[in-house]
Each structure stands twice: as C-alpha cells, then as structure tokens.
Amino acid sequence: MIRDSRLSSVLHGLLHMIGAGEPVTSEQLAKAMATNPVVVRRVMAGLREQGIVRSEKGHGGGWTLARDASGITLAEIYRAVGAPTIIAMGHRSENPGCLVEQAVNDALGDAFREVEAIFMKRLGAVTLDTLARDFKRRLAKHRQTIEDQIHAR
Amino acid sequence: MIRDSRLSSVLHGLLHMIGAGEPVTSEQLAKAMATNPVVVRRVMAGLREQGIVRSEKGHGGGWTLARDASGITLAEIYRAVGAPTIIAMGHRSENPGCLVEQAVNDALGDAFREVEAIFMKRLGAVTLDTLARDFKRRLAKHRQTIEDQIHAR
DNA sequence: GATCATGTAACTTCATATGTTACATGATGG
DNA sequence: CCATCATGTAACATATGAAGTTACATGATC
C-alpha cells in the first residue's frame, strides 16, 4: 500500500531545504510539514540513511540536502520514506500453504510486480529539482494572479 | 491503498460457495474466511449491492452467487470489497490549493492513473471460475502428493 | 560552560479495521 | 401461528499502527 501523506509531507520539507541555502532546523521544517520537530527527525532519519539529506548539531545546525537536487529522484525518496511495496496481498494469518492464496498469487503475482515496476519507474523519472522548478513556476504564477486581483480594484 | 486481506478473505468465501451447490450460511463462511458471521455479513453486503451474491433468510437460507462464476471478475469483487483506488496521495490536511501537492500531482497524476488502470485490467481478466478451476487443480495435486507420501511408507 | 540542535526512548493520543454482543426482521417448517 | 433459523444492523469492544508528545542524552558552536 501507499504511504501517502508521508511522501507529500517530506517533499514539502525538501523543497523548503532547497530554497533555504543554509541548514534548516527540525523546528522550521515542522512548520513547513505541518507537524512537530520530533516527527521531522524521525522521518528525515530515513532519508539520511539513504544519503539524501545530512544533519548537523549545534549552532547553525539543521538539515541540508546531501547532494544536488538534480540527482535525487522521487523513487529514492519514496523508498527512503518507507513504502516497501505498493501492493501487499494475503498474509492475513501467515498461510503460505493456503491453496486459495496460491491460486490468487499465481493469477495476479505478475500483475503486481508489473504495476509496482511501472510506478517506481515513473517516480524515478522525476527529480527533486524538476519538482522545485515546477513549484517555483506555480508560485510565481500564483503571485501574479494575486497582483492582478489587487490592481483590478 | 490496497485492502489486501479482505480480497483474499472474500475469495475464500466465494470459492466455498461455488463448491457448495446450496446456500452457505454466514456461520459456515466464517469458518472458511477465518472470521465471524457478523463480519461475513458486513463484507458480503458489499458484494450483494454489486449483484455478485444473493442472500436469503430463514430455513435453508444463506449466501449464493447471484450469477455464473464465469461472468464475475476479480475486478468487480475488488471494487465491491471496497478499495476505491490503489494510490491515494496527499489530502493530509485537505489542502487542494497547496502548490507543492499540485506540482507532485502534475508530475505523477498520470502515472497513478496508468498504474491503476493496468492493475484493474489485470484483475478484470481473471474470472471467479478460472480461479476455482485453478484451485481445484491445486487441491487434486495436493491430495495426490499426500497419497504418495502414504504409499511410500 | 551556556546555548542550540539533533538522537532517541517512552509514552500518549488518534484513526481505522476487525471482532463481539444484542436484538430486530423476515422466511420456513411443522 | 409460532418455534426456529438465518440475515440485517446498531452499538460497543479490541487491536494495530501511525502520528504526536515529553523528557532527556549527546554533540557542536559560540
């Protein structure tokens, strides 16, 4: 299954880091991600293990991207955030010998793998900086719209 | 996300119905589905609404397939069991106006829809009776294996 | 060494799926 | 017509896991 809110929340945080230019504290990220600092550290810890972000303690410390945003794909982030597979069937009572489940697995196993592969491939085709550019474009457009509304009065 | 255990559980129940030839009570199904009668009714109610099964009260009552197993696909069952979409992103704080989520949606929306479509197409290609035949084949083979073990002594 | 920031364990909600009890409704058989 | 059987469903209990919170240790910087 999909760990939906988490990916989107983490992306908020990462886009925030890109814009910052200096380490961003868990507290600041917590605001961007609409949660609290401890949860931020918990989630970001996963990204750090995958070499996506870095953390530093003490004065001027906080979180930064560990590498260039153009080299970080959404697939990596998705995996780091902890979503093993899209689809997980059966296993209700750990019955690997169940003949019904075997039949289902046989009928759909390939489909699952195929769907999973396609999904990850798509995620792998989008990098963080692509997303950041897109976001900035939207932001500019959004601001323009507000400007227009003001002048229209 | 995927309502994993439910589909597999329901399939157990449905295969049981196919083999029975007469109405199967919720109590009997509960055993086949490793749960209890009330849960069975709850889940089967969804299938009944989709015209997949029928229920009858009173003596000799219980659950039967509403149509031929060859006309019932796993896709229908999957939907009836209550799994709206495989993937559900965002919506953490109901922020349709959030520019980050808009950017993500724009980048991945098509991928989501594509993956979903493929998955449902695969589910749609498998009918209940195909599954039942496959199951019976496995059962026969399984029995044969046990026979062999007995004679080998 | 005072301060700031992360690291992490332990605990508390909170949401949701599932299980359970209890009783109402309807069908069948005698 | 009434006892019995089966579903229908509300109301409540339990279990699981995610998210939030508190508290304190560790390490870095000024």
Image (tube, coloured by chain):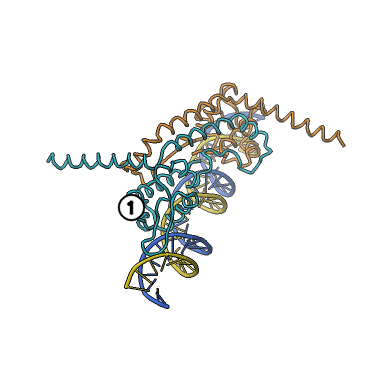
Chain colours: A orange, B cyan, C yellow, D blue
Q: Position of residue B48 (x, y in %)?
A: 47, 52
Image quarter where the C terminus of chain B lies is top left
Mark 1 Cα shell of 10 Å, populated few (<14), some (14-19), many (≥20): few
Q: Is residue C6 left or right of residue C28?
A: right
* Residue nearest the observer in this picture, B73 or A127: B73
With respect to residue B102, does B83 lie above or below? Answer: below
Residue A150 seen in the current view? yes
Q: Amino acid at mark 1?
A: Gly
Q: Position of residue A78 (x, y in %)?
A: 52, 32
Callout count: 1
Tag 1 secondary structure = loop
Q: Residue at x 33, y 44 (%)?
A: A95
Residue located farthest toward the right when viewing the structure as drawn: A153
Q: Residue at x 47, y 54 (%)?
A: B45
**Residue A16 found in image quarter:** top right
Residue located farthest toward the left when viewing the structure as drawn: B153
Q: Is residue B98 left or right of residue A76?
A: right
Q: Position of residue A115 (x, y in %)?
A: 47, 31
* Residue nearest the observer in this picture, C15 or A19: C15
Q: Residue at x 40, y 55 (%)?
A: B63
* Residue nearest the observer in this picture, A31 or B52: B52
Q: Which residue is mark 1?
A: B21
**Residue A24 found in image quarter:** top right
Q: Numbered disc 1: what chain?
A: B
With respect to residue B30, does A48 lie above or below? Answer: above
Residue A84 seen in the current view? no
